[in-house]
Image (cartoon, helix red, strand yellow):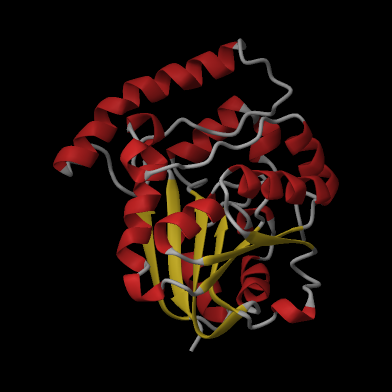
Amino acid sequence: MDKTSPEYWSDYWRKSDAAETINSPAKISLNNYQINCFHTYFKNNIQPADRGKNVLEIGCGNSFWLPYLHKEFGLEVYGIDYSELACQRTRDILKLSNTTGEIYYADLFNPPAELVEKFDFVVSFGVVEHFTDTAQVLSKCAVFLKKGGTMFTSVPNINGFYGFWQKAMDLDVYNVHVPIPQEMLKKSLESAGLKNVHITNLGVCSSSVTISPSVSWYSAKRIISLNLNRFFKIFWLLHTKLNIKLFGSNYFTANIISKGDKL
């Protein structure tokens, strides 16, 4: 069961600003620490020989990831989302970043036939945790992979500090998430038929949770969250420059990302 809906996301994006593109890793600073963690991860897992291959982002609405994946790794980019407004937002982002790509307004559970087993890579960022049956939704994601393809699945660490903070800052947003422990994610990916599954913690100490766009930028919650992230920059600096982790990696990890192959 989907804990959200196309209407939920259309309303959410209608009230939100358009995403900014990632122009260059060189411009990624501590202000974008979590994105920098993703960049390091993908540099280690997408090889120069992969240039020219294709990638599908599932739940691509208002996403900066497609132009990033094209410019940094030379991938042909595609996206799918079941919110028409979200799809248009992504088309606008591709246009602004001078990136050629194709966006499909379609449901993950009823995919266009021409997309089945089409892709070398499938990626999702914060999608599968909105479904109550994790194994089922991951199986649907894997349908898009070619034999020999690789799927990257990122979910927020709702089981750790990030989830605690999300619940404190916006309970309604927290309630549309399903906490997915690492072991559950691994078993669900294997149940979806993926092999060589590997789970990675990304980053430490983030309070950059999702707060409903209807909440004023001058609200106490937004101000508290912003200032806590400023404090956390101390730990981001230690982690980035010195590889020092002062907190337990599991509880204070903000994001979890998995890699699995369709053999």
Question: Which residue is more in the foreground, 156 or 161?
Answer: 156
Residue placed at 26% from the left, 38% from the top?
A: 247
Does residue 175 appear to the left or right of 122 in the view shown? right
Measured from the top left, where is residue 117 in percent x and y?
64, 83
Decide which of 118, 37 is in the foreground and name it.
118
Q: Quadrant of residue 228?
A: top left
Residue 146 occupies which quadrant of the picture? bottom right
Residue at point 76% right, 57% down?
A: 2
Q: Is residue 36 left or right of residue 156?
A: left
Q: Position of residue 183 (x, y in %)?
A: 45, 66
Residue visible at 39% across and 43% down?
Answer: 24
Whether residue 203 is visible, yes or no, is: no
Q: Residue furthest left?
A: 242
Question: Image height check: is 228 above or below 191?
Answer: above
Q: Residue furthest right?
A: 7
> In the visual, does 220 lie left or right of 15?
left
Give x and y (percent) for residue 21. Answer: 52, 41
